[in-house]
């Protein structure tokens, strides 16, 4: 790389040239991120380079920081919830230009393939969603000052002042929504709210059971509340979570450690006189998916799987029961939301004071203090910590 050509991040008009700027790099499994300068290449075909305004920390960032061999992938730039401004655009980009405020989203939407054109799916087949260390063309835009390649994360990589993202992973933000609220819609909150709204299609007056009251579970509750659910049961092994959960619309609580000789599903079946209309698994344990399935109502009950268990974990059901009970079980990636059309609706509902995003933001820190955000999440003290790049 021609060093003389690299533009300092503080200077303008870097279009077409590499930019040198600060990044928080995940260098070793489980260790704090390292603040260092990196080189961000210009965007290639159908890509945009984005100056990040703020980013927030999601559990997946922590999960992938902790991953050890063989699935580990370091050095890597994590982060996938963000808001930024387009700094420059690559060849073939239409619909975005320099200065546009945008939200990067890990779920690609090409808007052209059979799946993107269908109302029934948000799983693009031109750019399949996977946890890849690269952008869609199988290469990286990041190098460190020694010339070593740094890996991408979830097609976004927002723990850096400038990142490069494919246009299939970006939506334009045409709303005065504050960036420290809009960034939440990149992943966690949208996933939870969307799963109640789009995947389950929760109806007014229905009963909902949520397994796991972490930030995703609380976002499911928020979505179910918006849809008009009458009873929202939260299940968690930490009873302290019930107080917090009330603010998100949870009406009833089941302490999974205090069920005596009964199974949680038995208790939910009793509380709902035969099963909840919608059950959500937000922890990532196969046995909890089975429990959720066991307490959704026969005939029309839906179980929505959102938690990520180990790759080799399997579900076990009696096939006779599946037949006789007539229930549905489904997976939900990004809450079933189509980023380009559904996120603007969620933004409008926030601006109309219906969707409550403020209560998810428990902390805000500057970029230098990004490791504090990890500590707060690991200690269970924060739902969402917003990280400001310029403060
Ligand atoms: Zn597509
Ligand atoms: Zn996430």
Image: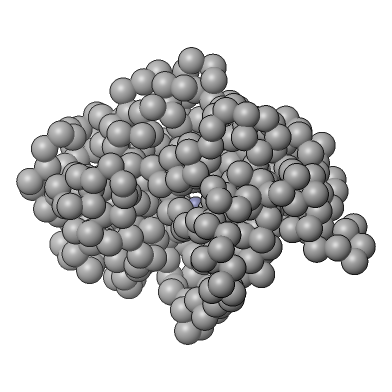
Task: Give the quarter of the figure containing the N terminus.
Answer: bottom left
In the picture as drawn, the residue positioned furthest to the front comes out as 324
Judge left or right: residue 56 versus residue 265: left
Question: Residue at image x 74%, y 58%?
Answer: 265
Residue 339 seen anywhere in this rendered image of the structure: yes
In the picture as drawn, the residue positioned furthest to the bottom comes out as 70
Judge left or right: residue 160 versus residue 32: left
Observer-nearest residue: 319 or 188? 319
Question: Residue at image x 69%, y 49%?
Answer: 275
- In the displayed structure, 334 sits above or below 221; it is below
- In the displayed structure, 158 sits above or below 96; it is below
Q: Quadrant of residue 155?
A: bottom left
Colour convention: one colour
Q: Position of residue 267 (x, y in %)?
A: 81, 53
In the picture as drawn, the residue positioned furthest to the top comes out as 352
Q: Position of residue 104 (x, y in %)?
A: 35, 43
Question: Residue at image x 66%, y 61%?
Answer: 294
Q: Position of residue 86 (x, y in %)?
A: 26, 36
Q: Quadrant of residue 355?
A: top right
Question: Residue at image x 66%, y 46%?
Answer: 276
Residue 31 seen anywhere in this rendered image of the structure: no
Observer-nearest residue: 193 or 205? 205
Q: Position of residue 204 (x, y in %)?
A: 57, 28
Judge left or right: residue 252 versus residue 319: right
- In the displayed structure, 64 sits above or below 326; it is below
């Amino acid at each position: 790389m021609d060093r003389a050509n690299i533009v300092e991040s503080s200077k303008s008009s870097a279009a077409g040239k590499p930019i040198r700027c600060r990044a928080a790099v995940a260098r070793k499994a489980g260790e704090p991120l390292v603040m260092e300068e990196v080189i961000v290449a210009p965007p290639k075909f159908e890509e945009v380079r984005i100056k990040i305004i703020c980013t927030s920390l999601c559990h997946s960032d922590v999960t992938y920081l902790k991953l050890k061999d063989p699935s580990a992938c370091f050095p890597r730039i994590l982060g996938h919830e963000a808001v930024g401004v387009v700094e420059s655009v690559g060849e073939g980009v239409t619909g975005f230009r320099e200065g546009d405020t945008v939200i990067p989203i890990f779920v690609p939407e090409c808007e052209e393939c059979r799946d993107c054109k269908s109302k029934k799916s948000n799983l693009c087949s031109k750019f399949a969603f996977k946890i890849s260390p690269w952008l869609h063309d199988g290469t990286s835009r990041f190098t460190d000052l020694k010339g070593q390649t740094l890996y991408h994360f979830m097609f976004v990589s927002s723990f850096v002042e400038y990142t490069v993202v494919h246009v299939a992973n970006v939506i334009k933000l045409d709303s005065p929504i504050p960036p420290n609220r809009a960034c939440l819609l990149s992943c966690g909150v949208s996933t939870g709210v969307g799963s109640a709204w789009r995947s389950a299609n929760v109806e007014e007056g229905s009963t909902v059971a949520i397994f796991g009251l972490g930030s995703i579970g609380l976002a499911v509750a928020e979505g179910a509340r918006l849809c008009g659910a009458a009873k929202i049961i939260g299940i968690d092994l930490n009873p302290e979570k019930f107080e917090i959960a009330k603010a998100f619309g949870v009406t009833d609580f089941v302490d999974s450690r205090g069920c005596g000789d009964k199974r949680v599903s038995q208790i939910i079946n009793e509380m709902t006189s035969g099963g909840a209309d919608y059950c959500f698994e937000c922890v990532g344990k196969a046995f909890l998916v089975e429990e959720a399935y066991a307490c959704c109502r026969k005939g029309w009950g839906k179980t929505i799987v959102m938690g990520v268990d180990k790759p080799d974990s399997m579900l076990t059901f009696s096939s006779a029961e599946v037949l006789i009970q007539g229930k549905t079980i489904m997976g939900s990636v990004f809450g079933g939301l189509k980023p380009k059309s559904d996120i603007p609706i969620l933004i409008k509902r926030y601006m109309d004071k219906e969707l409550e995003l403020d209560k998810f933001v428990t902390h805000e820190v500057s970029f230098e203090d990004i490791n504090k955000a990890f500590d707060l999440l690991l200690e269970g003290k924060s739902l969402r910590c917003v990280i400001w790049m310029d403060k």
